[in-house]
Amino acid sequence: MKRLENKVALITGAARGMGESHARMFIEHGAKVVLTDLSIDAGSALANELGDNAVFFQHDVTKSDSWDEIIKRAEQEFGPVNVLVNNAGILGPVSKTEHLDEADYLKVCEVNQHSVYLGMKAVIPSMLKAGVGSIVNISSIAGIAANYGFPSLAYVASKFAVRGMTKATAIEYGLNNIRVNSVHPGFIQTPMMVEATDEEGGDAMSLIPLGRIADPKEVSNLVLFLASDESSYITGSEHLVDAGMLAQ
């Protein structure tokens, strides 16, 4: 069954990690997918591999004019966008508040939080034209609890903000048939996760009740559900993929 047939989806940070996994699964389920990332080589190679229903554009998610251009080009390629996955994000330095440089703090918030605002603002007019929309904002378990694995004021602040922005926008656009939800992954086997564990040097397994790090597909399964019409009565909610970490 093609669960995303007739859907036009835009996925940010799609060149690797969870974004790449989401893109592969969306194509498998019939969507036309616009992949965006700063990495031209990786993004272009993935789009070429995925075929005619995928296209890649280089995209700085922190720039409003870049978002406007991406939406315009997406509509030219496939028509109005009715799924947005705000996946792009960075961890930033793992640092206690007193040692956290202001520029580093602002950079993390710009990429992880401000870009989500810009993405929702840019895509909603396209979704209004489509008559339906689903926005999936990728947050983190650090958007619900502040100290799981890699405590950092900037990262936690940005991911908590995404959770709140999701709820506010869901309320505003419910009557327009636009749903907005946030996904909160725990430890997922991605390049960013590998870099973070190498930097921190901790034993991630000791924090995970299921005793293993997730494959990105295990997050993509949830993102696929939220993007599809199967979740038509779900909006303004946070959805954990954390192997029970926050149950402790």
Image: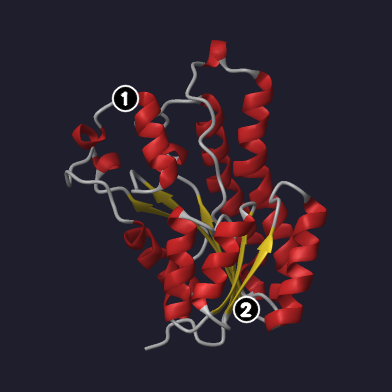
**Closest to the observer: 193 or 182?**
193
Kindly identify the amino acid type of the residue bearing the numbered disc 2: Val
Taking the spot 54% from the left edge, 31% from the top edge, the residue there is 92
Q: Secondary structure at mark 1?
A: loop
Q: Is residue 47 left or right of residue 79?
A: left
Quadrant of res 18: bottom left
Q: How many marks?
A: 2
Above or below 46: residue 104: above
**Closest to the observer: 90 or 83?**
90
Taking the spot 26% from the left edge, 34% from the top edge, the residue there is 204
**Closest to the observer: 99 or 194?**
194
The residue identified by callout 2 is: 132
Residue 232 seen: no
Mark-to-mark CA distance, 1 and 2? 44 Å
Q: Is residue 243 left or right of residue 57?
A: left
Q: Position of residue 40 (x, y in %)?
A: 64, 57
User: Residue 201 bears which disc, if any?
Assistant: 1
Q: Is residue 128 left or right of residue 145?
A: right
Q: Position of residue 24 (x, y in %)?
A: 44, 71
Above or below 176: residue 37: above
**Closest to the observer: 214 or 143?**
214
Kindly identify the amino acid type of the residue bearing the numbered disc 1: Gly
Taking the spot 44% from the left edge, 54% from the top edge, the residue there is 17
Proximity of marks 1 and 2: CB atoms separated by less than 8 Å: no
Q: Position of residue 169 (x, y in %)?
A: 64, 57
